[in-house]
Image (cartoon, rainbow, N blue to C red):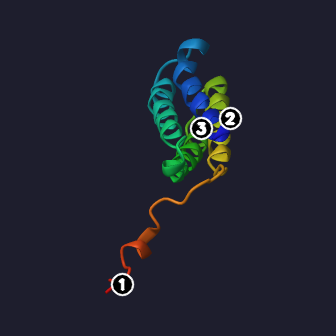
Amino acid sequence: MLAQLFALLLGIWLMSAPGLLGYSGVVAAAHHVIGPLIASVAFVSLWEVTRTLRLINLVLGVALAVLTLILAWPLGPAMTGAAVGILVAVSATFPGRQTARYGGGWKSLLRPESK
């Protein structure tokens, strides 16, 4: 749960970084799009039943880090994007503590009928 809270804060930081650090353009637009996605996925994955959705942040974090390497962004925004992307991807690898089992998977649907 702490890793998802950390990712939530990183998403909020990424949304606000263009305004606080004073950059604009394509890099700011990318941060304004990816930041809320990261924060939303992290917020939803705070609950144990939806915890596996955190893997979406793994993809978003890697995409953000790779995007900063591919595009020729200024150094400050590029370092912000790369650092946030790497930290979000790493935080998405921590599953958190599981106290209950939900659903049961496909086996719960394919149980033989009892007579």
Is 68 in front, or is 49? 49
Label 1 neighbourhood size at 10 Å, few (<14), some (14-19), many (20+)? few
| Label 1 to label 3: alpha-carbon separation | 52 Å
Amino acid carrying mark 1 in the image: Pro
Q: Amino acid at mark 3?
A: Thr
Tell me if residue 33 can be seen. yes
The disc placed on residue 83 is 2
Which residue position is annotated with label 3?
68
Front residue of 74/90: it is 90
For the point 50% across and 18% down, which residue is it?
24
Question: Could you tell me if residue 53 is visible in this image?
Answer: no
Could you say whether the residue bearing mark 3 is in a helix, strand or loop? Answer: helix
Residue that numbered label 1 is attached to: 112
Nearest to N terminus: mark 2 or mark 1: 2
Q: Position of residue 28 (x, y in %)?
A: 50, 24
Q: Which residue lies at the image location 52% right of the left edge and 43% below the top edge?
A: 47
Of badges 1 and 3, the one in the foreground is 1
- Locate residue 6, reporting x and y percent: 65, 34
Q: Residues within 10 Å of mark 3 (few under 14, many from 20)?
A: many
Going by the image, does 70 lie left or right of 29?
Answer: right
Tag 2's secondary structure? helix
Cα separation between marks 2 and 1 = 51 Å
Left or right of residue 91: residue 55? left
Foreground disc of the pair 2, 1:
1
Q: Position of residue 96 (x, y in %)?
A: 65, 49
**Mark 2, residues whose alpha carbon is within 10 Å: few (<14), some, or many (≥20)?**
some
Q: Position of residue 56 (x, y in %)?
A: 50, 49
**Residue 66 vertical position relative to residue 109 in the rendered view, above or below:** above
